Image (cartoon, grey):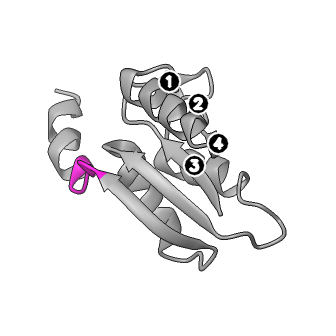
């Protein structure tokens, strides 16, 4: 089983949650991958880019994967898991379902 943690919007692998989970998994001798979903370019972040980025981390040998996601990371995890049977488990922490409905009106150019 492979474990991947996906951080939330405006967060990073160095967030308190990410660091805590990394330490907790290490204490169990279990590897946890935490990609930087911002890819050093937060201003051009897209859901489709995040999905592609995480999909590229999935083992080619078909090893089962558990995705742990927080907020927008949970939204990304759920979207990726819809069509990927390799993802066997999801742990969603405050998933940002309805993210676009909430934020797009606030970001509209006036």
Q: Which residue is mark 3?
A: 4
Q: Earlier in the sequence, mark 4 or mark 3?
A: 3
Q: Is residue 58 above or below residue 16?
A: below
Which class describes the residues within 10 Å of circle 3: few (<14), some (14-19), or many (20+)? Answer: many
Residue 12, percent across and down?
48, 25
Distance Cα–Cα, label 2 vs label 1: 10 Å
Q: Is residue 90 part of the magenta span, yes or no?
A: no
Residue 83, percent across and down?
55, 77
Of the numbered discs in the image, which one, if any, rests on residue 36? 2
Q: Earlier in the sequence, mark 1 or mark 3?
A: 3
Nearer the camera: disc 2 or disc 1: 2
Out of 66 and 28, give the one closest to the viewer: 28
Nearer the camera: disc 4 or disc 2: 4
Nearer the camera: disc 4 or disc 1: 4
Out of 82 and 3, give the one closest to the viewer: 3
Distance Cα–Cα, label 4 vs label 2: 22 Å
Q: Earlier in the sequence, mark 3 or mark 2?
A: 3
């Amino acid at each position: 089983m492979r474990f991947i943690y996906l951080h939330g919007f405006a967060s990073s692998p160095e967030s308190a949650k990410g660091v805590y989970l990394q330490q907790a998994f290490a204490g169990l001798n279990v590897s946890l991958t935490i990609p930087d979903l911002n890819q050093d370019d937060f201003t051009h972040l897209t859901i489709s880019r995040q999905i592609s980025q995480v999909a590229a981390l999935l083992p080619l040998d078909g090893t089962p994967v558990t995705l742990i996601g927080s907020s927008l990371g949970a939204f990304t995890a759920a979207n990726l898991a819809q069509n990927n049977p390799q993802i066997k488990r999801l742990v969603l922490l405050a998933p940002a379902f309805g993210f676009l409905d909430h934020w797009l009106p606030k970001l509209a150019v006036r």
